[in-house]
Amino acid sequence: MSDSTVTEPEGREGVAVPQAVTGEDSGGLPGRLRRPRRPRLWFEILLIALSYWTYSLIRNAVPEQRGKALRNATWIWNVEDHLGVAVERSVNHAVNSVTWLIIGMNYYYATLHFVITISVLVWLYRWHPGRYAAARLVLFATTGVALLGYYVFPLAPPRLMRGGHFVDTVMVHHTWGSMASGDLKHMSNQYAAMPSMHIGWSLWCGLTVFALASVPWVRVLGLLYPAATLLVIVSTANHFWLDAVGGVLCLAFGFTTARLWYGSLPYTLPRFAPARSRGPEPAEAPAG
């Protein structure tokens, strides 16, 4: 199916959406659900809150399986060593030697994961309502498939490896930088490191900003954000490089899900959702 080019209200060009996406030729509930529409604020707040609560509940309900997680960590480390990319420990020690930098990374790890993701969702809701639901589906599908990874492949982070000689930067510098360190470790499953949702979510944010932002330097920042996140998760010894690969694969699944459901990638949908149908206009009474 070929796409034709149309001009959007803001003067930028976009890609016309197939009729299957707009729902014009499809009837019934599936067609209505797949039709881009303006999101409702109360519903989105409730949905995101419930979804994150469910994600946290399931993630933390995964049996920690400490022994298996530690064995998997050793296996990952050996695989990376065989591939010649096992440099996490060197990066961890090098960055840890610069106190102000590693403390900043601890806070980055603890906060931006949530702040930036929510900010991008709000931006989409406000400025790209027609693309919001599809982009949100990518994020939700990415997170959902990550839960499967936590079940089937429990993995200890590098800082918990036996004999790994990694520095737990939060513990050493007494900063609040991880839900899996210090007194906060009892609130989060410490052995759910694969895949890395810090990478999955940050890459979703970066690609969304790069694809839709109109200001060039903002688009560049969008691409730098997941790159900086990768450096942070390795420097703080919370993830291996391969955990990041797992996050990327989960995001690919999320985009595939949205593409199959809407028949188009989120960024090629119309910026503004069509007005909701109010039904046929009532017929005028005959003049008498």
Image (spheres, helix red, strand yellow):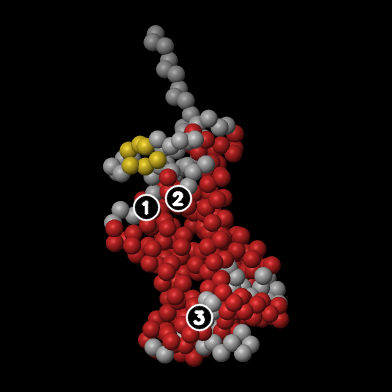
In this view of the protein, which residue sits in the foreground, 122 or 206?
206
**Residue 222, quarter of picture:** bottom left
Q: Residue at x 49, y 78 (%)?
A: 234
Q: Is residue 59 left or right of residue 287?
A: right
Whichever of callouts 2 and 1 sits on the residue coming sooner in the sequence is: 2
- Are circles 2 and 3 on residues that touch, CB within 8 Å? no
The disc labelled 1 sits on which kind of residue? Answer: Leu
Q: Residue at x 59, y 73 (%)?
A: 193
- The answer to whether residue 112 is seen in the rendering is no
Q: Nearer the viewer, mark 2 or mark 3?
A: 3
- Rendering coords of residue 252 (x, y %): 54, 56
* Residues packed near mark 1 inside 10 Å, few (<14), some (14 to 19) or many (20 plus): some
- Rendering coords of residue 108 (x, y %): 42, 76
Identify the residue position indicated by label 2 in the image. Answer: 132
In this view of the protein, which residue sits in the foreground, 126 or 135?
135
* Residues packed near mark 3 inside 10 Å, few (<14), some (14 to 19) or many (20 plus): some
The disc labelled 2 sits on which kind of residue? Answer: Tyr
Q: Is residue 15 left or right of residue 31?
A: left
Identify the residue position indicated by label 1 in the image. Answer: 212
The disc labelled 3 sits on which kind of residue? Answer: Val
Identify the residue position indicated by label 3 in the image. Answer: 87
Q: CA distance from mark 2 to mark 1?
A: 11 Å
Q: Secondary structure at mark 2?
A: helix
Q: Is residue 87 left or right of residue 79?
A: left
Q: Residue at x 40, y 35 (%)?
A: 4
